[in-house]
Amino acid sequence: MSHQGFTLEELTKLEGHAKLSVEMEGSVVKNTKLEVYEASRYFESLLLGRDYREAPSITQKICGICSVVHTLASIKAVEDALEFIPSEQTVDLRKLLLYASNIHSHTAHLFFFALPDYLGFGDVIELSQKKHDYIHLALDLQQLSSEMVKMIGGRALHPVTPTIGGFHSVPDEKKIAALLKNLEGVKRLSLRTARLFSGLEVPELEARSRHVCMKNKKEYTLYDGMITSNDGIIFRPRDYKKNIIEGVMEYSNSKHAKLRGMSYMTGALPRLNANYTKLSDDAKALLKKSRLKLPSNNPFHNNMAQAIEMVHFADEAKNILEKYRNGMQQEKHAVSLREGEGVGCCEAPRGLLFHHYGIGSGGRIKYANVITPTSQNAARMEDDISVFLPTLHGKPANKVKLLLEMLIRAYDPCFSCSAHFLELNLKKK
Amino acid sequence: MKAKVAFIGMTSCKGCFFEFLLLGKRLVGVFDNLTITNFWMLKEFNDKRGEYDVVFMDGAVSTDRELEELKSVRERTKFLIAYGTCACWGGVPALRNSAVNYRQTVYPQEPKFTSRDAVDPIDRHVKVDYYMRGCPVNEDEAFEVIVNLLTGKKPREKEYCVCVECKKREIKCLFKEGKVCMGPVTYAGCNAPCPESRTPCDGCRGPLPDRNLGAEIQLLKDQGITEDDLKLIFSKYNNVAEKFEKVKDEVVR
């Protein structure tokens, strides 16, 4: 048997630093390793001995892109430990913040990282010089959605208003009106984005993977629900430890999670596969006209799923804002300290996120664990590459490199979160 | 010839890069007037060996690989900016300098990429020409610095506290309401977005040199804040900042 190998040194247009090594024998993939060499920050240990009230503002610094969802998952975990149940208005405002920040994050990923590949440009800087309409669409949408996050969260990144129990400040009537006006633009531009992405031709890959997301009966949820797989597994977020095992890979600073022994995908595509009947009318109409047929097992469809989600999230955001047309009321947060343990789970733009803390005497954190979407997707990315690579047999090396990078990018990975770069090492022995 | 500008990242959340993208349409002008030689998140080809006019260095130094890169970049750079609180002060990653058994806590067995024992701000190892503070930085300040450099001016740091900006905007004082606010002892430049949304300043831009720290500490103690809590509050972003050594002394006194 012929032993072959080639090395691809660098993967870019991603959040964080990682490297991919593939060993092949003939056309058979023997081994795939996704090495995340982004420096570890040992976040869980940073929390030990800190005050429970600091957990959200420290853990939001796990990630610059998904800081909103880290903040909220952290708050939920603390509230779970304190057995505190937030008010309806608080939950609505948290959902609104999640919708706005998901649109913001999806916009950045779709236009800055993913789109240049599909249009044959090296990167977004080249795209910006040649496709003025697309870059303006991207920048306008990014600005409008980040302004929404800022209006609610106080800052576009690392939000400051959400706190344990509720919000330091809530939008008054004037701000709700401003948010609604902003949202009109977000909806219009999200529709254009969704039409653009749902018309893109994506590489074929039948991955037959396990898909996992949060699900509830009421809505296309990002905030609460049961953890559900496409092959019938269902459990409460609190029971994550009984179901999800995180392993340390000697080659990577990111842990690799498996669900009952199997790699799995989490993110926009699993969410859409499981929840598409609950989409808004406009999002449903888009889905119907798109190239996307559900359920889809092609991870490249994750980008289309994100684009369709943006339209749905804009509609959901509108529903919440209209409910509070007269402004929200500043509430008192009657949180009382007790010792306990709690789990907070939310859907980040790129998939499931778990925060888990133990609070000891005096409110000091005595246990902390965080499972990020990328550490859950890492094992699945490796498995996908093993399935995808043999189908690329005979293609020129630069095309193979591009397609593998596109596959990894389709997951919208965030390697800062997971440990936290992508350099590609393809070894054919 | 256009100025060569590089964005290089070390240990951080990469949020300060993302914050730069919030420049919106101003980005088109930036891309047209500068040659961005490195921007990990955006660019396919990054020039790792070349010479740069300006470098935005993000993140703290936490691995040997990063330290080597930092020193090499400094030799090839005319104007080096410590970009963000991690680069300026160590930031949240530097909390691990006082964490106990951090490796064993997070990884049952150590992965291949071992970290340095301490997380350092970059000026522990190289000369810094400008400090852009904040967790995250403020994109308007980043734009201002770029415009300054393009027009041949040396950008100036704001050597006053957050309270100045807060008062200018007529935001109601949270300190007076008995909240633990770090505004009086923290570098300005953010335009006080936290107090604006009724959230006390948590000091993310770092300790201002000529602050009245003793008075701040006494006032906080009067509000019933314990010394243990004071240490937590002052260490959050500035655990290894040299100025913080003084803070620790004053807290203990």
Image (cartoon, coloured by chain):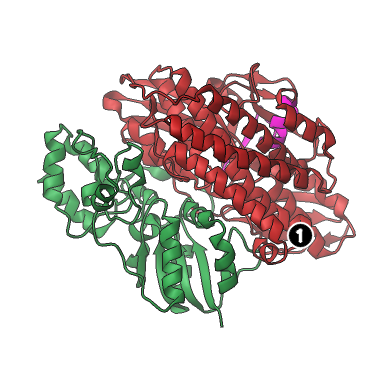
Q: Residue at 26% of width from left, 52% of height from top?
A: B186
Residue under label 1: A401
Magenta run includes residue A252: yes
Spot occupied by residue A209 in the image (x, y as percentages of width and height): 76, 34
Magenta run includes residue A355: no
| Amino acid at circle 1 | Lys
- Report whether B5 appears left or right of A311: left
In the rendered image of the structure, the colour used to display chain B is: green
Give above or below for A413 relative to A319.
below
**Which quadrant holds the N terminus of chain A?**
bottom right
SS of the residue at dot 1? helix
**Which quadrant holds the C terminus of chain A?**
bottom right
Who is closer to the viewer here, A17 or B104?
A17
Spot occupied by residue A37 in the image (x, y as percentages of width and height): 55, 55
- Report whether A260 appears left or right of A161: right
Who is closer to the viewer here, A207 or A303?
A303
Chain letter matching colour red? A
Identify the residue at the far bottom of this view.
B1
Give above or below for A176 relative to A194.
above
The magenta segment is A251-276
Identify the residue at the far left of this view.
B253
